[in-house]
Image (cartoon, grey):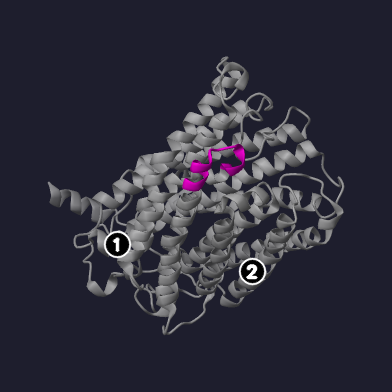
Amino acid sequence: MSAVIEEHHEEHHDHKPTGIGRWLFSTNHKDIGTMYLCFSFLMLFIGGAMALVIRAELFQPGLQFVEPEFFNQMTTLHGLIMVFGVIMPAFVGLANWMVPMMIGAPDMALPRMNNWSFWLLPGAFGILIASLVMSIMGMGSAPNFGWTFYAPLSTKYGPASTDFFIFSVHMMGISSIMGAINIIATIMNLRAPGMTYMKMPIFVWTWFITAYLLIAVMPVLAGAVTMMLTDRNFGTSFFDAAGGGDPVMFQHIFWFFGHPEVYIMILPAFGVISQIIPTFARKKIFGYSSMVYATSSIAFLSFIVWAHHMFTTGMPVTAELFFMYATMLIAVPTGVKVFNWVSTMWKGSMTFETPMLFAVAFIIMFTIGGFTGLMLAIAPADFQYHDTYFVVAHFHYVLVNGALYSIFAAVYFWLPKWTGNMYDEKLGKLHFWVSTISVNLLFFPMHFVGLAGMPRRIPDYNMQFAEFNQWATVGAFIFGFSQLILLYVIIHGIRSGKPAEGRAWEGARGLEWTLPSPAPYHSFTHPPEVRDDEVHT
C-alpha cells in the first residue's frame, strides 16, 4: 500500500494549483506563508498611514488637521493594526514558510487549519477598518479608547463599534491559537530523523516557545473582551465600580495577556537574528544551549512582570517591589542573548550584506529599547515616566527598531529562497540607511519630550516641545515612504533579479539551504538526512 501511495505522490510532485483557487483553498505552507507576509505588508502601509496622520497633527502645537476624536481613533487603530495585523502575522508567515523546511518536514502538521487561521485575519481587520470608514462617512465612531482598551473608556463610554471591535479581537485570537497549535504539532511530530530538539535552528526554538505563550495568553484576552461585552450589553459590572466591579481589575487581566504578548512579538525576532548573525559571521552561533535556555527563561518570566504597566494605579508597595525586581530580572536572559550575538560576531569573517546590516542595527537599537525598559521598571522613576512620550519611545525602539527590523532582515535573508532570485544589493542598502536614519530621527527625540513631561495620546501639547516634535514628524514621513523602496526591491527582485543558488549565502547552513532556490512547492517529501555540518549547534 505504501509503495502505491509513494508512486502516486511522485507523479504529482510539484503539482501547483492555479488561479485564485490556489490561494483561497491552499493548504501548502509556502502559499499560506506568502499570504501572511503579503497581508502583513498591506497592513503595514495602512497602519503606517494612520501613524502619519498622528505625526502630521503633532507637527505643531494646537489643533491642525483632525478633530481630537478622530485623533483618538487613529492612535487606537494604529496600535491594534501594527500589533495584531503587522508584527504577529509577519512572524507567523515566516514560521509557515521556514519552520517545515528547517526541520525537514513536508508541510505543516495541520494544513487545513492553517488555511483557516489565515483567512480569519482579513475578516477581523476588515471589521476594524470598516468601522473607520463609517466614522469618516459620519456614521458613528471607530474604536477611540487606545489599543489597550481600558475600562471604563471601552465599556461605559465606548462607541457602538466597540462590540464589533470585540468580535474582531476574538477572531484574531482564534487565528493566533490555531496557528500556535499548528506550529507546536509540526515541530513535535514532523522533525526529520536525527533532528533532535537540541539540533533545531534557534528560529524554530523561539517559535516553539512563542507558540506556547500564545496558547497560554490568548484565552486571557478572550476572557477580558467577553467581560467587556457583557458589561456593555448584559448588565454585568465586572469593571464598573458602581456595581461592585473594579476597573483596575481590567488592567490586571489585560496586562497578564499584554506582557507575554510583547514577548510573543520579540522572541521570533531573536530567532531570526540568531539565524542571520552566524551566517554572515561565518561561525556557528556562540552558546547555542544558553540561547535556548535564555528564551525559555524569558517566556517564563514574562508571566510575572505584568503589573509594571500599573505602578501608578495604587498597588501595595510590596507588589510594586515584586514586579520591579521581576522586570529587572528579565533583563538578564535578554542580556545573555545580546552577549551571544556579539560573541558570535567576535573574530568572525563578517560581510555586511543587507540582512546583516539590519541584524546589527537590530542589536544596537533593541538594546537601547531594552535599557529604557529597565528605566521604566524602576517603580519610583516610573511615576514620572508613566503615560509620557518616554514610554512611546521605549516600546517603539523595541517593536519598530527591534521586531520590524528583524522582519526586514528576514525578508532580505530568505527572499532568494522564496523567489529564486537575488534582490538588488544597492537598493537594499539604500532602504537600510534611509530607514535607519529616519527611524532614529522619529523615535529618539521622544525620549527627551517624554522626560520633560509631554503626555501620550494627546493631539495638542505645550510650546516647549514643538521643535523635537517637528523633527519626529519629518523622521516619520521619511521612514514611512522609505518602505516603498522595500516594495520596489521585492518586485524588482521577483521580476528581474539574478537567479539565486540553493545556498544563497556563503555561510548559510541548515536544511532549508539544501533545497534549490526557489524552494519547490512540495519540499522534503522524503525525510532528509540531518548532517552534523548542517546543524547550528
Please report the residue visible at 65 percent of the width from the left and 28 percent of the height from the top: 161
Instruction: Tell me which label, 2 or 1, sits earlier in the chain.
Output: 1
Where 44 falls versus 306 (above or below)?
below
Q: Point out residue 89 in the picture as x, y percentages from the top left corner.
A: 50, 49
Disc 1 packing (10 Å; few <14; some 14–19; many ≥20): many
Q: Quadrant of the C terminus?
A: bottom left
Q: Which residue is mark 2?
A: 436
Q: Which residue is mark 1?
A: 200
Disc 2 packing (10 Å; few <14; some 14–19; many ≥20): many
Residue 513's image quarter? bottom left
Residue 104's image quarter? bottom left
Magenta highlight range:
310-322
Q: Point out residue 333 in the picture as x, y percentages from the top left corner.
A: 41, 61
Distance from Cα at disc 2 to Cα at disc 1: 32 Å
**Disc marking residue 401:** none
Please report the residue visible at 32 percent of the width from the left and 68 percent of the height from the top: 288
